[in-house]
Image (cartoon, rainbow, N blue to C red):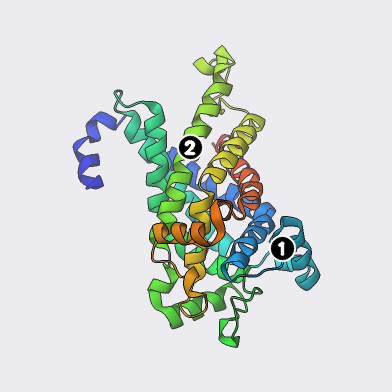
Amino acid sequence: FLWVVLQSQRSQIKNNMATSDDLQLTVQSSVLSSFIARTICHPLDTIKACIQAQQAVHVQENNNKKFFSVSRNIFHNEGIKGFYRGWGIAIAGGAPGLAMYMTAYEAAKGFGSSNTTVHPAVVHFTSGVFAEAVSCILFVPVDVVKERLQVQSSPIFTGKNDYYLNSKDAFIKIAKQEGVSGLYKGYTSTLVSFGPFSAFYFLFYEKLKSAAINRDSRRSDGDGLKPGQSNITSMESLGAGSIAGAAAAFITSPLDLTKLRIQLNRGGDMNSNMTYNGVLDGLRKIYTSEGLVGLWRGSMARVLFTAPSTAISMAGVEHFKTLLR
């Protein structure tokens, strides 16, 4: 359907779509910025996953649910390497995944911008959803392997067959024991979770970016810029990415919590009350058993991870585009 629409509107949007050179720059910039952001922020993601998974198996020690307590426990039991469980698969799949994500976003934004009757905020919102739908083809298997590695020291893993030696071992065992569906467990919930996140993120980011540019009339008009130079500074991009990421992460935290628990679920490993038949069923059960506060379990850790991660990623993309042009 999308192909038919693009073909029918090809002449109209030709001048608005990104060129092949622009898309190539987006891919290269995304790979570089993804590596930097993931390496710096992965420990925060591991802490977030552990906090959310603990509640799923009814771990009652209150201190273990707290950010700093979980951090101390990981460091005490495994050292620095414990914070980097799942880093390998996150890098291997995350870098090309972000490239797919940003390329799809730029293409969708170019397509939407060709219709002058559509408000820019709507274009940015829907482009974010589209980018997530495309990139989830790669992101979901990466997410499943990464999150199971991150939380495998928790009580949810009870047998020797549940323990993964590394990313490759986890991928092979999941594929062998659960099939392709195991690797794509929670695909729908990931779309439901990260679709709104991406939509809100780009809505906020583009608004903040425009506000920064419009402060300077020369930058707004493109005057005084060198060829290929971005009209937003690295610091402005960091600030916009951080604020947009934090806001979008907090708003969609209940969806992320439900998504993570669905992906960790292997059937008999979890309490029946924590086995979810989809996102809505998961949200209902979490609210029933843990209350409204439970829906935002791990939200602080998610914000602490997402804000710098998205800031570095977006600032990196902007910076490397200018550097590589």
Identify the disc placed on residue 36.
none
Is 24 in front, or is 274? 274
> Residue 79 at x, y = what percent?
78, 68
> Residue 183 at x, y = what percent?
44, 70
> Residue 81 at x, y = what percent?
73, 68
Q: Quadrant of residue 80?
A: bottom right
Q: How far apart are marks 2 and 1 (CA)?
A: 36 Å
Q: How crowded is mark 2: few (under 14 residues within 10 Å), some or many (20 or more)?
A: many
Q: Name the residue under label 2.
A: 202
Number of marks: 2
Would residue 64 be found to the left or right of residue 208 on screen? right
Residue 20 can be seen, yes or no:
no
Is 319 in front, or is 1? 1
Q: Name the residue under label 1.
A: 62
Q: Quadrant of the C terminus?
A: top right
> Residue 114 at x, y = what percent?
31, 28
Q: Quadrant of residue 44?
A: bottom right
Farthest residue, direction bottom: 160
Residue at 68% in and 64% down = 84
Q: Earlier in the sequence, mark 2 or mark 1?
A: 1
Q: What element carries label 1?
A: helix
Question: Disc 1 residue type?
Answer: Asn
Q: Is mark 2 on a helix, strand or loop?
A: helix
Residue at 57% in and 39% down = 247
Residue at 62% in and 74% down = 152
Residue at 76% in and 67% down = 73
> Do callouts 2 and 1 mark residues in contact (Cβ within 8 Å)?
no
234 lies above or below 293:
above
Is 16 in front, or is 20? 16
Tell me the mark number nearer the camera, choosing from 2 and 1.
1
Question: Disc 2 residue type?
Answer: Phe
